[in-house]
Amino acid sequence: MGLHFDLAYGTGTLPLDLPDGLAPVVLVANEQPALPDAVQAVRDGLKNPIGAEPLVKQLKDKKPEKIVVVVNDETRPTPYYAFFPPLVEAFEEAGIRDEHVTFVFASGIHDPL
């Protein structure tokens, strides 16, 4: 007979039947301590990325006419308070003017927010 589960899905459920001999396993991500200063950690990462030149140097070398930053919508718990200030600072340091930067919110197939 196996195991039967009703998985939450949207406002309802989906059935899941596991055959005999298979058992579910719950995986839990390892907990990591919070960064003492997330904004500074992003600044440091932009100045010293792994395997690449610092963002400001890349921008100065390439001299892009326009920059598009694609971000997810508010349904995802992205800590933009930590990402945006250092990113905008890097754009400013590279001489990128505000009117040459566009932020696009990728909402996927979600309803408009």
Image (cartoon, helix red, strand yellow):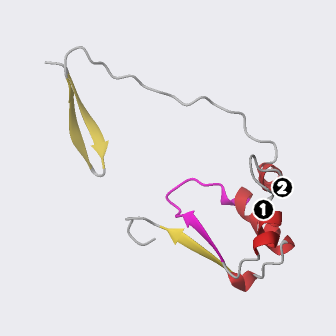
The three-letter code of the residue at mark 2 reads Lys
Residue 106 screen position, x and y as percent: 49, 67
Percent of width and height locating residue 7: 28, 38
Q: Quadrant of residue 103?
A: bottom right
Distance (Cα) linking label 2 and label 1? 7 Å
Magenta-tinted stretch:
67-81
Q: Is residue 1 magenta?
A: no
Determine the residue positioned at 74% across, 47% down: 51
**The N terminus - image quarter:** top left
Q: Residue furthest right?
A: 93
Q: Residues within 10 Å of mark 1 (few under 14, many from 20)?
A: some
Element type where label 2 sits in the image: helix
Q: Of all residues shown, which one is farthest toward the front?
A: 61
Quick check: marks 2 and 1 in contact, CB under 8 Å?
yes
Q: Nearer the viewer, residue 7 or 27?
A: 27
Type of amino acid at the residue the image marks with label 1:
Leu
In the picture, the disc for residue 47 is 2
Label 1 sits on residue: 55
Query: Helix, strand, or loop for circle 1?
Result: helix
- Horizontal and vertical percent for residue 17? 19, 29
Figure check: 90 above or below 14 = below
Q: Residue at x 28, y 51 (%)?
A: 11
Going by the picture, which residue comes out furthest to the left? 1
At a point 80% along the width and 49% down the height, the residue shown is 41
